[in-house]
Amino acid sequence: MSSLHFSLIQSSLFWENKEANLNMFAQKIHAIEQPTEIIVLPEMFTTGFSMQPEKFAETMEGPSVQWMRRMSAAKRAVITGSLIIEEAGNYYNRLVWMLPNGELGYYDKRHLFAFAGEDQHYTAGNKRLIASVKGWKINLQICFDLRFPIWARQQETSEYDVLLYVANWPEKRNHAWKTLLTARSIENQCFTIGVNRVGLDGHDLSHSGDSMVVGPVGEILYHCAHEQDVFHIELQKQEINNTRTNFPFLSDADSFKII
C-alpha cells in the first residue's frame, strides 16, 4: 500500500506584506531536504487574515500564483495554501492546489467567518475540492470550515483519505481547533491535518499555531504550539484501510446529499 509525504510549515506572517511573506516561505521551502510530495502553507499565507481584499487581491495569473508554480516545479512537490483572489469582480479566500507540472485546482472557502466580517468582503464558495495524489484522496478546506462537520462528512463509500485544513485560527479558541481536528478524524476515519500560523497579526491577535496531524482513530501524530516549525511526516494508506476494516462504522452512517 502507498505512503504519502507531507511537509507542514507553521510560521509567523508579515502583516499584509506579500513580498516579505513570499521571500520567507521561499527560504523555508528551499531548505526542505527530506523527501516530500505535498507542502502545506497556512491560510492567506501572503498577507495574513486581511479584510482588505481590494488592496491585496490578485488574479489567478498574478505574481503569488506564479510564485507557487515556480516553487512547486523547483521542489517537484504539490504546494498548497490559501490567498486572496479576485475573479469577475468578486473576492475569494481561495486555496490553490499547485502541481509540479504547473496545473492547479482550487477551493473557495465555503464558511466565511462573519464574526470578523469576512462575509462582508469575500464571496463564499459552493464546491468541495478533493484532490488525488498517488491514489490518495485529499479533501481540502479552510479554517472556519472546521466547525461544520457536514461539509467534511464522509459518505458510505469513503470519499477521501486525508482531510486538510489551512488556517489563521486565533489562540483564544485553540481548544476548539484541537478538539474539532480530532473529532473530524474520528468521525470520518481519516487522517486530518491542520496547518495554522503563529504570532501576532495586524490587530494584535495572538495565534498559537497548534498545527496537528491526527490519525484515523483520533491519535495525535504531531502537535506544535507557539513555535515556528517545518514538520515532515509520512502517512501510510494501510492504517486507514485497517481502521475502516476493523471498525466499519461508516457503513452505519446516515445518508445525505450536499447540494
Image: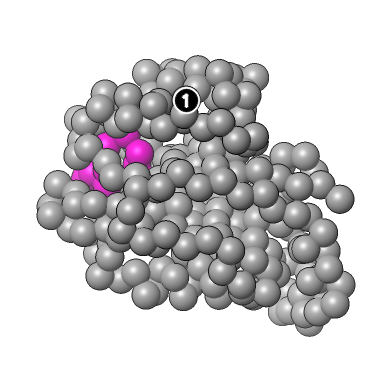
Viewed as shown, does residue 25 lie left or right of 246? left
Residue situated in front as seen by the camera: 145 or 211: 211
What residue do we see at 41% from left, 68% from top?
Answer: 177
Identify the residue position indicated by label 1 in the image. 30
At which x and y percent is residue 4? 70, 45
Residue 67 lies, with reference to residue 245, above or below; the image says: above
The magenta region covers 43-54
At which x and y percent is residue 190? 68, 64
Viewed as shown, does residue 254 lie left or right of 145? right
Task: Please name the predominant secondary structure of the magenta segment in the image.
Answer: loop
What residue do we see at 64% from left, 61% from top?
Answer: 191
At which x and y percent is residue 247? 81, 79
Q: Amino acid at mark 1?
A: His
When asked about the image quadrant of residue 53, the answer is top left
Q: Residue furthest front?
A: 33
Crowding near the residue tagged with mark 1, few <14, some 14–19, many ≥20 C-alpha atoms within 10 Å? few
Q: Is residue 96 magenta?
A: no
Residue 78 lies, with reference to residue 194, above or below; the image says: above
At which x and y percent is residue 250? 76, 75
What residue do we see at 27% from left, 41% from top?
Answer: 13
Viewed as shown, does residue 248 lie left or right of 105? right
Viewed as shown, does residue 78 lie left or right of 189? left
Quarter of the picture containing the C terminus is bottom right
